């Protein structure tokens, strides 16, 4: 596992499982951290991983800017909707994803294990 | 489109800068925690305040650190009132497209106002559109 600290207050731990990358985002994706987080996630999207699982279990806070960073990485992964998926968001983050209706844009899994076991569903409509 | 002009007891004027904005946010959130708000309410206030500050910096002041952001607030055990004012020309919130529309879900930006509305009990802009007022009641 490699750990990266894009910015004070947030850390991204990256582990690789075959062709899948699991990025565990920990801390607060606040206004001063999101630009660095975005660069990190876009770099991951531009890399060779066939699948990227963003483990949100350690994410305590995220603003619309942080959500935008994840969306930008997701769009970089198009046309395969399932190339970048979300896993294990805490309740406040899950609620935020529902309020913004981003739960319709992203596939969200209860756990990283569940995301690992799921079958990629091919290109998005 | 406008809110009453009752003065609020606390006032902070900061340069339009994200680090300064974050420090102010943390200061207000400390007062919110001390006033006995739930974790859920603290999350909501943090999110709404952060969106207001980022909008003031990026859109109102266009990232110009020579401009200022003025934050006035009142935190008491029953409710939190926060106003965030920038030095921009203002805007009309009703002209901002709905970010939850299916064709806009994949757009990375434009969720700030919607989130503020969703997470506080009352959100209003002044007539010019360069100051927003957030009110969150303590629903213990």
Image (cartoon, coloured by chain):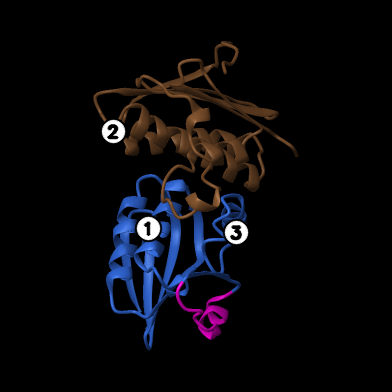
Chain colours: A blue, B brown
Residue underneath mark 1 = A72
Q: Residue furthest front?
A: A125
Most foreground residue, A21 or B106? B106
Residue drawn at 48 percent across, 34 percent down:
B96
Q: Secondary structure at mark 1?
A: helix
Q: Residue furthest bottom?
A: A18
Residue underneath mark 2 = B63
Callouts 3 and 1 close, C-beta under 8 Å: no
Q: How far apart are the two marked residues, 3 and 2, measured between alpha carbons?
A: 30 Å
Q: Using the image, determine if residue B62 lies above or below residue A58.
A: above
Q: Chain of mark 3?
A: A
Q: How far apart are the two marked residues, 3 and 1, measured between alpha carbons?
A: 19 Å
Residue drawn at 35 percent across, 25 percent down:
B14
Residue drawn at 45 percent across, 58 percent down:
A27
Residue underneath mark 3 = A94
Q: Secondary structure at mark 2?
A: loop
Q: Which residues are magenta?
A: A111-123
Residue B116, quarter of the rendered image: top right
Q: Chain of mark 1?
A: A
């Amino acid at each position: 596992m490699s750990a990266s600290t894009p910015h004070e207050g947030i850390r991204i731990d990256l582990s690789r499982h075959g062709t899948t990358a699991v990025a565990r985002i920990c801390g607060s994706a606040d206004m001063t951290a999101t630009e660095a987080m975005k660069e990190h996630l876009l770099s991951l999207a531009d890399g060779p991983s066939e699948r990227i699982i963003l483990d949100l279990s350690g994410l305590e806070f995220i603003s619309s800017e942080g959500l935008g960073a994840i969306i930008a990485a997701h769009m970089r992964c198009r046309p395969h909707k399932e190339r970048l998926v979300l896993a294990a968001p805490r309740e406040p983050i899950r609620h935020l994803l529902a309020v913004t209706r981003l739960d319709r844009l992203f596939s969200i899994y209860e756990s990283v294990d569940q995301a690992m076991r799921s079958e990629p569903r091919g290109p998005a409509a | 489109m406008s809110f009453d002009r009752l003065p609020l007891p606390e006032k902070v004027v900061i340069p339009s800068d994200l680090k300064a904005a974050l420090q102010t946010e943390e200061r207000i959130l400390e007062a919110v925690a001390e006033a006995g708000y739930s974790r859920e309410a603290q999350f909501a206030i943090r999110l709404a305040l952060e969106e207001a500050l980022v909008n003031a910096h990026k859109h109102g002041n266009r990232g110009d650190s020579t401009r200022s952001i003025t934050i006035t607030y009142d935190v008491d055990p029953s409710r939190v009132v926060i106003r965030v004012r920038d030095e921009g020309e203002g805007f009309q919130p009703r002209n901002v497209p709905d970010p939850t529309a299916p064709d806009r879900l994949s757009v990375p930006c434009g969720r700030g106002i919607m989130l503020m509305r969703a997470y506080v009990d009352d959100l209003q802009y002044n007539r010019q559109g360069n100051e927003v007022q957030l009110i969150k009641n303590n629903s213990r």
